[in-house]
Image (cartoon, rainbow, N blue to C red):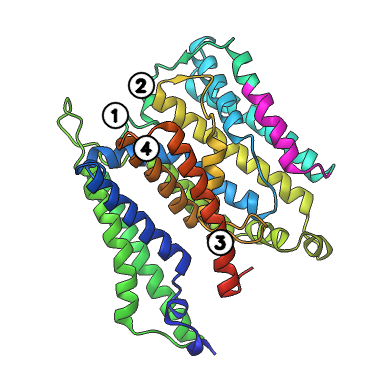
Amino acid sequence: MNQTLPMWRRVGIDLRLLLMCALLAVLGISFHILSGGVFLSPENLYNVAQQTAVVGIVSTVMVLVIVARHIDLSVGSVMGFIGVLIAYLQYTSGWSWPAACLAGLAVALLVSIYQGWLTASLGVPSFVVTLGGLMSFRGAAFLVADGKTQPVNDEFFQRLGGGYDGGIGTTWTWLLAALVAVVLVARMLQRRRARQRHGMPIEPLWLELFLVAVPIVVVFAFAAVMNNYRIPSKEEAQGLPIPVLIWAVVAIVLSFLVHRTRFGRYVFAMGGNPDAAALVGIPVKRVTLLLFALLAVLVTVAAIVSIARLNAGTNSLGSGMELYVIAAAVIGGTALAGGSGSIFGSVLGALIMQSLDSGMLLLDVPIGQRMVIIGQVLIAAVVFDVLYRRKFGEN
C-alpha cells in the first residue's frame, strides 16, 4: 500500500510546507530585486530575523491553542502588560532583572490561568474571554507605569534582545550549524534503520541523503549570512542573534511536546473531537489550563525579548501582535477548525509574514496599503487551507 502513495509522501515530505518554502524564496528574491539588492543583504536579514523572533515565539504555542479549538486574542495586550511590568520593576522599583522576569511570569500565569479557567471550567468561549482581555490588559499596561516609558539598562538583559552585543559570535554560530547538520543526518539514518528493522519499504539512500542535504545547506547559508553582518563600530561579526536562538529552542521544545509527550497527543485529540476525547478519559479541563499556562510562559519570554530589544517597556508594546501571531499559525497550516497544525509551519508562517511586511517597508509602501495586503494574505491562506484539505482529504 505504501508504494501506491506519491513519492513526496513516501519520503515524508509535507507538500504544504514545501510550497511555503518556495513562497518564502520567491518573496525574498522578488523584494531583493525590487529593493535594488537590499532585502537579502546580511544587515537586513539579520534585522528581519530579530524582528520575526518575537512573533515566532508566540506563534509556536498559538498553533497548539488553535489546534485545541481555542483562540487567544489577548496575547499582544498581555505581552505589553507583562513587558511594562518587568521594565517598571527594574527601572522604577530597582529589582534585578531575574527577579523582575520571575514576577512578570507569575503575573502572566495568573492572567492565562484565569482566562483558561473561564474557558475550561465555565465553558465561556475563549474568543469572548480573550477579546475582553485584549482591551483590559492593554489598559493594565498603561496603569502599571502611569503611561510612562520604562527604560532598562542592564547590559546582560539588553543582549537578550539582540542589538549591539546580541549575537553569539561567529564560532558558536558555525558550531551550532554543524550540530544541526549532525542531528539531521543522525535522524535520517535512525528512521531508515527503523524501517528496515520493521520490514517497511525504504527509498534509495541517495534520495534520502539529498533530502537531508537541502535543509543542511539552508542552515549553513543562514549561518554564513549572520556571520557576514558586522556592526561598523565592532571588530567581529554578530553571528546568530540571541532572540533567534531563543526562538529555535522554543520551537524544538514545542515540537518535542507535540510528538513525544502525552500532553501533545491530548491537545490534538481534543482538537479532533473534544467530546470523544473526554469520553476516552482525556482530562480536557486540565489540559486546557496547562495549554494556557504554556502560552503565558512563552508570552513572558516574548515580552522579555521585546523590551530587551527596545531597551524599554512601552505602553504600545505588542499592539496588533495577535494578528501576526494568528496569521503566522494559519499561514503555517494550522486549521482554524482545530485538530491540525505544525510547529515548523508556524516558523515558516512567521517568516513569510515578517518578510512581506519588511519588504513592503523597504519599498516605501504606505502603511494603509501594507495592512490591506497583509489582511488579504491571511484570507488567501485560509482559502488555500480549505482547498488543500479538500484536495488531499486531510482533516
Which circle, 2 or 3, is nearer the viewer? Answer: 3
**What amino acid is found at the position of numbered circle 3 in the picture?**
Asp
Which circle, 3 or 1, is nearer the viewer? Answer: 3
- Give the side of residue 123 with respect to residue 167, left or right: right
Task: Check whether the beta carbons of the residues at disc 1 and disc 2 lie within 8 A of each other.
Answer: yes
**Whole-Å distance between the Cαs marked 4 and 2?**
18 Å
**Whole-Å distance between the Cαs marked 2 and 3?**
44 Å
**Whole-Å distance between the Cαs marked 1 and 2?**
9 Å
Task: Check whether the beta carbons of the residues at disc 1 and disc 4 lie within 8 A of each other.
Answer: no
As helix, strand or loop, the secondary structure at mark 3 comes to helix
Quarter location, residue 138? top right
**What amino acid is found at the position of numbered circle 2 in the picture?**
Glu
Specify start and end residues of the magenta stretch as a single range. 123-138
As helix, strand or loop, the secondary structure at mark 2 comes to helix
**What amino acid is found at the position of numbered circle 4 in the picture?**
Gln
In the rendered structure, which disc, 1 or 2, sits on the residue that comes first in sequence? 2
Residue tagged by mark 1?
165
Q: Position of residue 84 (x, y in %)?
A: 54, 20
Residue tagged by mark 4?
50
